[in-house]
Image (cartoon, helix red, strand yellow):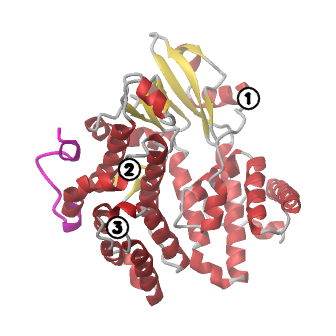
Amino acid sequence: MSVSSLSYPDAVFGRAAPLPRRALLRRVLRIGSVSARHAARSGWRRGDRLVGLRRAIEELGPSWVKVGQLVAASPGSFPPAVVDALKGLHDGVAPQTPEATTAVLDAELASWRTDFLDFSLEPVAAGSVAQVHAARLADGQRVAVKIQRDGIIDALEADLRLLRRIAASAVRVRPRLDALRIVEAIDDLGAGLEEELDFRRELENMALLTPLMASWGIRVPRTIERLSGPRVLVMEWVDAVPVRDPAVIAGKGGRPDDILRRVLGSLLESAFVLGRFHADGHGGNVMVGDDGAPVLVDFGIVGRVTPEQQKACAVMLDGIFTGRFEMLGFGMAMLPEMAHAPPEAGAALAEVAGRHITGSLSDMKMGVLLREALETANEHGVPLPASMVLLFKQILYFDGLAAVLAPDFDLFGDGSRYSPMLSAVAAGTPLTGRSWSELALGA
């Protein structure tokens, strides 16, 4: 494959200029070297090769870690084996140098040295795209400052262009791979990253979702708009810890089942009423404050659901929550994407549902049913909407979190309390008079 063939015009992050050939060549050689080394160490067993893939991604650095995390977060868009292998990716990347941090601050917030009374250049958390620093404003207020990694946009753009080119070449060589929609999936990743990399979008998401979250008793850090911009986001400091240990939650006066109920309820209401939802609710972003109340952070990844998708998803979730599993097929049939699905896709989905209907409701694993339905749709080339997959992925994640935090709490069984609201959405007649939180929590 020639370097010139990789310099193609597809726009990434809204830009269509070709990549510099010398920089592209260096990146290709680096990727090839790292990939070959891990492939040689992994052997020929498929499971070992997938472990080698994850290790290669970790070595290639923040941009590849981010892409790998997004693949792992898209169970309906990529082959299940690849998704499972990349679930082990974490944000445990080294922080950028203080010089890189100050370079971003100088470019985005030239007055930062006077805006902040204290500013720690040692981050309290470092991720693949950004890191968070503790600081204190001139008036003494404690704040958290989210700063984008210097150069991450260019690195991600280069890597996504390469991935897209490789995927397109693979589809040309093996046309049957087109059913997996690999190229389209990479385009979806690029679109999501474009939004995540502009912190002004995150600020807007927080402003939109905060009132709804408050109605569920969930705290969202207040942002300081005058100090925020495309690559810097300043918000109030909230003393909270991730919801990973039920003993820690209890020590702060909280209840795991109550936190899970509120987080799931807020997810559903935001998706079905606002058409936008927090799509990155893993255990590090769902926290518990010192008062025992849930805290939600990091609104960089937000899903959007169209009215048509809202109706279809409402039918599917209502059926899953209430044990009427035939509604799973009805809901999928409502999606425009199903109009072009092969006949065997419907039969395969019905077979998945039938396997789970045979037992009693208490014995059914709702999370397994939902995951198998997504994987079956993917295997039969049914391009489920990315936002719908993100929504279901969040529910599956909360179900897994419930197994750790509150083993006796049935997240899907408890979800039946949302049936009246979901039925109203499916019928196109949203409830009026009382909020979802009032109806679900009996407030």
Q: Which one is earlier in the sequence, the residue at label 2 or at label 1? A: 1
- The residue under label 1 is 97
Q: Residues within 10 Å of mark 3 (few under 14, many from 20)?
A: few
- The one nearer the camera, 376 or 198, is 376
* Residue labelled with disc 2: 277
* Alpha carbon distance from label 1 to label 3: 56 Å
Residue type at tag 2: Phe
Kind of residue indicated by mark 3: Ser
Crowding at label 2, few (<14), some or many (≥20) Cα neighbours within 10 Å?
many
Q: CA distance from mark 3 to mark 2?
A: 32 Å
Q: Residue 284 vs residue 425: left or right?
A: right
Q: Is residue 435 magenta?
A: yes
- Tag 1, which secondary structure? loop
> Which portion, as a residue range, is magenta?
425-443
Residue 210: quadrant of the picture: top left
Q: Which mark is residue 360?
A: 3
Query: Residue at position x 71%, y 25% from top?
Result: 98
Q: CA distance from mark 2 to mark 1?
A: 33 Å
Q: Are marks 3 and 2 in contact (CB under 8 Å)?
A: no
Q: Residue at x 46, y 82 (%)?
A: 348
**Numbered tag placed on residue 221 in the rendering:** none
State which mark lies toward you, 3 or 2: 3
| Front residue (pair 71, 203) | 71
